[in-house]
Image (cartoon, rainbow, N blue to C red):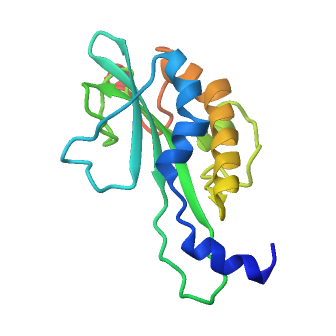
Amino acid sequence: MNKNDWGKMTTNRIDFQAALKKAVIPKLLPLGYQKMHLSEKWRGAPITFFQKHLFENFYGYIQFQIAPWTPNPIGCEPMQRSFYLYLVRNIGEEPDPIPRKYPFYLFMPVSYLLWNIFDFHKYESMYHEWNYLTKEELINQLEMATDDLLSFGIPYLEDLNSKNPFMKSGNDEK
């Protein structure tokens, strides 16, 4: 990319929701995950959830969260943006990533899952941010993240024997 492209990109809005619609939703819909309409509690947050009823009153959630960023001043090189990808499994039809001590609860970054559960060090850290600068890079990063989600994340999320390594479940306490 050359400096002449910088001005075009700063005025060229990158629409995260449109990118999700193109790169992610067609892969999640056949698996039963529906994009959620956020409640008042979540409105305005840079978060998108996909939800699936798993069993009884437990639901699985896939959370795409845009990392905070500030616009760059005109004439300056564009700043990278990024997003995170999390798995959430909890009780109820509202995502609630606050740690709970009950069986089957789960909250985990997908990159953490790859590093610590599957010992697959695909990324430079267990808390990976998918970075992008352009619409094309965003689509590419979403496709890469979704491949990891389909191969590792969703099977782990939907497996009732999978545990949250960050805390003991309610069944583990004595």
Specify the quadrant that holds the C terminus.
top left
Residue 34, percent from left and from top? 41, 26
Q: Determine whether, in the image, residue 171 is placed left or right of residue 43.
A: right
Q: Is residue 134 above or below residue 37?
A: below
Q: Is residue 12 above or below residue 28?
A: below
Residue drawn 61% across and 31% down? 149
Residue 12, percent from left and from top? 57, 68
Residue drawn 73% across and 35% down? 119
Residue 57, percent from left and from top? 26, 15
Across the whole image, how many numbered discs are drawn on residues?
Answer: 0
Residue 53, percent from left and from top? 36, 16
Q: Is residue 46 above or below residue 1?
A: above
Q: Residue furthest right?
A: 2
Q: Determine whether, in the image, residue 102 is placed left or right of residue 129.
A: left
Near-viewer residue (82 or 73) = 73
Q: Residue furthest top?
A: 56
Specify the quadrant that holds the N terminus.
bottom right
Q: Determine whether, in the image, residue 97 is placed left or right of residue 131.
A: left
Residue drawn 21% across and 41% down? 39
Residue drawn 37% across and 27% down? 105
Q: Quadrant of residue 7?
A: bottom right
Near-viewer residue (125 or 3) = 3
Q: Quadrant of residue 52?
A: top left
